[in-house]
Amino acid sequence: MTQGARHTPGRRTVLGAAVLGSAAALALPAAAQAAERGTGGHGSSGAELPVPTIVGHRGSSGYRPEHTLGSYQLALDLGAHVIEQDLVPTKDGHLVCRHENDITATTNVSDHPEFASRRTTKVVDGTSITGWFTEDFTLAELKTLRAKERIPGVRQRNTLYDGRWEVPTFEEVLRWADAEGRRRGRPVWLYVETKHPTYFRGIGLALEERLAKVLRRYGRDRKDSPLLLQSFEPSSMQRMAKLVGTRRVVLLDAAATRPWDFKVANDPRTVADLVTPAGLKWIASFAQGIGPTLDLIIPRDAAGKLGTPTTLVRDAHAKHLILHPYTMRNENSFLPADFRRGTDPNAYGDAFGAFQVWFEQGIDGIFTDNPDTGLLAREDFLAR
Ligand code: G3P
Ligand code: CA
């Protein structure tokens, strides 16, 4: 099994040990650990998150079509500490929750003959894509569509909910989160990603100023607001840093890749450069955390088995950056080979075992399509 840095169970932090400082975060008494397990550690100011933090990836996308109010509600009801939204704009400038601007796979747009002529081919971040795009629809038009399961071959049961929910606007999600927060007596945390920010700025639909305006309107623009911002394009987080105080996380794709904004700006750095101490120091100059792939923490070999952990957790913490890697999913096809069970790629493997390995590395949280599994695994980890 892996040999990463041992995570101290039950430590309570503002966002993670890296932010608070390790001396204060370690060695909580047993009663405090139990309280932390029981309450989730949410502060009324929204400033606290339990560690390790369980982030509902696109809501509870293991069980419901992603980025729907149904997916977000279930994630919250299951106990996820934070609920994730990916944001793209409509033609008339509204921010809506979709993983990408191409809505072909996650809505029933292809069933709407009135929109048949909107099908087109575009180059987004260097990739040619044919489909229907949010920026070609007004919000009113988009609202006539219904969401559907992205991967029905893998998650057939989720197709039960196809057609049930609309594409939500970010403002609708904020209103839902505020209402749920009042009902529960604690803030509902959100984790908001700007998608394709350079592309959208280039077509006159810049995300950051719109997002900042909405965050201010809903009072989530402060450093202690219960919301984390995230982007694969560091320049998007740099822009947000100038607009609002809300905390920021830089997402990191595979080591050999280059963020799209770097390519546009002729910045030669790759993700491999960003995970060096110098790269992490640069990120820490405008962000509070990183969201790396799981593989950047423990690489997999050609057979999909886990190898030797990298020093990324230690190196990021040394720069006072928290780590929220992505994405844990219960199905065999997504798990490291070490944790697959049987030969059906769509069957669940030993997800509990896999979660332990990631927690053992000392991560501050994790994105998962299955927040209930993540929460139970977290309980196992904290009880050890
Ligand atoms: O934002 C964390 C994780 O969601 C990044 O991957 O592609 O699912 O947005 P993606
Ligand atoms: Ca995301």
Image (spheres, rainbow, N blue to C red):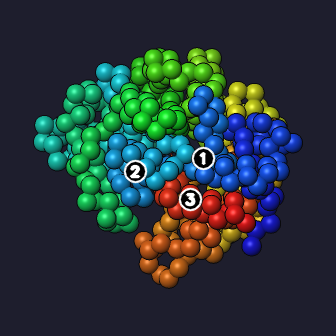
Direction left: furthest residue: 113
- Amino acid under disc 2: Leu
* Image position of 133 (left or right of 77): left
Q: Residues within 10 Å of mark 1 (few under 14, many from 20)?
A: some
Res 74 label: 2
Q: Helix or strand or loop: what does disc 1 sit on?
A: loop
Res 40 label: 1
Q: Helix or strand or loop: what does disc 3 sit on?
A: helix
Q: Residues within 10 Å of mark 3 (few under 14, many from 20)?
A: many
What percent of the width, then of the height, locates residue 208? Answer: 51, 23
- In the figure, 334 relative to 312: above or below? below
Q: Earlier in the sequence, mark 2 or mark 3?
A: 2
What percent of the width, then of the height, locates residue 147? Answer: 28, 46
Quadrant occupied by the C terminus? bottom right
Mark 1 and 2 residues: CB-CB less than 8 Å, in contact? no
What percent of the width, then of the height, locates residue 249? Answer: 63, 36
* Figure quadrant of residue 182: top left
- Amino acid under disc 3: Gly
- In the figure, 161 relative to 118: above or below? below
* Image position of 28 (left or right of 152): right
